[in-house]
Amino acid sequence: MASSLTLSLISAGCIFGGVLLGFVLRRLLPEQHLDGESKDTIKLGAGMIATVSALVLGLLVASAKNTFDTTEEELTQRGAKIIFLDRLLADYGPETKETREQLRRTVAASIEMIWPDEKKGASGSTDYEQMNGMQVTQMTLLKVTPTTDAQRQLYGTAQQLLTDLRQSRWVLIQRVQRVIPIPFLVVLLFWLTMLHVSFGLFAPRNGTVITVLLISALSVSGAIFIVLDMTHPLQGVIKVSIAPMRKALEHLGQ
């Protein structure tokens, strides 16, 4: 699928193209098609399209923001669980040193994949899907054999946390797979384009009007960009914060 920026630019071109189409139609249509009664009817239809488009676009933005916030909250909880897991392993004793080192390597690799340096380019969400660091960490812990009741309790809690971390990782990966259906976007784009056709049909052709309508097209396409980008919170321009995982990495091994 094309990137969010590409789709938003295509949307901007189509919407502003609707304005230009309106300018052309104004010159081609007979005068009786643009008289007072026709103008009122067209404005009524444009108002209906504007209401429906605003409602749908607002719901899409709210849904995308909810997905983004949910992912950010899950990453915060994930960071807290990782810190707690490291503390449990420290309380267990020196036998878990290898597991703690593996846990640190796994967290560091996850950060590098999801939030790579700018010089390395785009997000590595695909690499994150393929990595098995938490699985290796859990397998490493299985080599440890608890001998006291306290160790058995710590061991059981640590294994449960590792299982939760492995499961939550796949929840994050599955969330990235969500996409907004293309037919849905096409219908929304058609509404917005037709709305701007009506603007161009009656607007005077001067620099100020054209600039305002261009800004309108860019603003609406910007909303579409926000929806598309925030639907994938682990990649793209608008990504969840790295802070919780960075903080977790700082505390590991202490």
Image (spheres, helix red, strand yellow):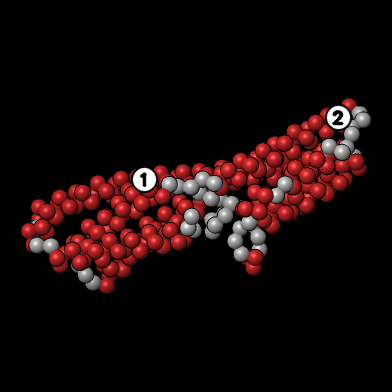
Point out which mark residue 113 bears.
none
Q: Secondary structure at mark 1?
A: helix
Residue located farthest toward the top when viewing the structure as drawn = 149
Q: Residues within 10 Å of mark 1 (few under 14, many from 20)?
A: few
Q: Residue 209 sits in which quadrant?
A: bottom left
Left of 188 or right of it: where is 65? right
Residue in the picture at 67% in, 38% down: 167
Amino acid type shown at disc 1: Val
Q: Earlier in the sequence, mark 1 or mark 2?
A: 1
Which x, y percent locates residue 18?
27, 61
**Which numbered tag is attached to residue 152?**
2
Q: Residue at x 36, y 45 (%)?
A: 56
Q: Is residue 104 left or right of residue 236?
A: right
The residue shown at (56%, 44%) is 175
Would you say 228 lies left or right of 176 here?
left
Q: Amino acid at mark 2?
A: Arg
Residue at left offset 38%, top offset 47%: 184
From the image, tell me which residue sits under label 1: 56
Q: Is the residue 110 above or below the residue 135 in the image? A: below
The secondary element bearing badge 2 is classed as helix
Q: Residues within 10 Å of mark 2 (few under 14, many from 20)?
A: some
Q: Residue furthest bottom?
A: 207
**Residue 25 visible in the current orientation:** yes
Let me know if residue 114 appears in the view. no
Residue 163 position in % (x across, y down) = 72, 36
Q: Is residue 108 left or right of residue 68?
A: right
> Quick check: 199 above or below 181?
below
CA separation in Å, label 1 and label 2:
54 Å
